[in-house]
Amino acid sequence: MVQIKTESNKSIKKAAIILILGIIFILLILRWFALKYMFAYM
């Protein structure tokens, strides 16, 4: 019972880390596109 609890906590932490990395990745891509379009219009 205790082991199952720690396993689920590990998977939740892993999912949270993946989610955070995904959000950072998307923000970096959006920033890169914004800079690209800014330079294109200038």
Image: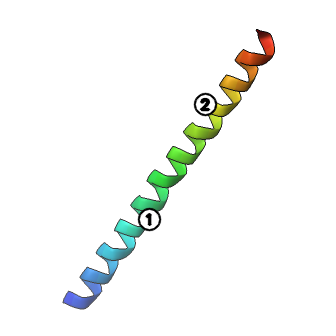
Using a 10 Å C-alpha cutoff, classify the residue at mark 2 as few (fewer than 14 neighbours), some (14 to 19) or many (20 or more): few
Whole-percent x and y of residue 35? 67, 24
Measure how far apart labels 1 and 2 are at the Cα level: 24 Å
> 16 and 41: which one is in front?
41
Q: Earlier in the sequence, mark 1 or mark 2?
A: 1
> 5 and 17: which one is in front?
17
The correct choice, above or below, for 26 with respect to 35 in the image is below
Say which residue appears at 76% left-offset and 8% top-offset. Answer: 42
Q: Amino acid at mark 2?
A: Arg
Whole-percent x and y of residue 36? 73, 25
Q: Is residue 18 left or right of residue 32?
A: left
Look at the numbered disc 2 and give the secondary structure of its residue: helix
Extreme residue in the right direction: 40
Say which residue appears at 51% left-offset and 46% top-offset. Answer: 23
Can residue 21 be seen from the camera position used here?
yes
Q: Which mark is residue 15?
A: 1
Q: Is residue 14 left or right of residue 25?
A: left
Residue linked to disc 2: 31
**Which corner quadrant of the image does residue 2 belong to?**
bottom left
Extreme residue in the left direction: 2
> 35 and 2: which one is in front?
35
Whole-percent x and y of residue 31? 61, 30
**Which corner quadrant of the image does residue 26 belong to?**
top right
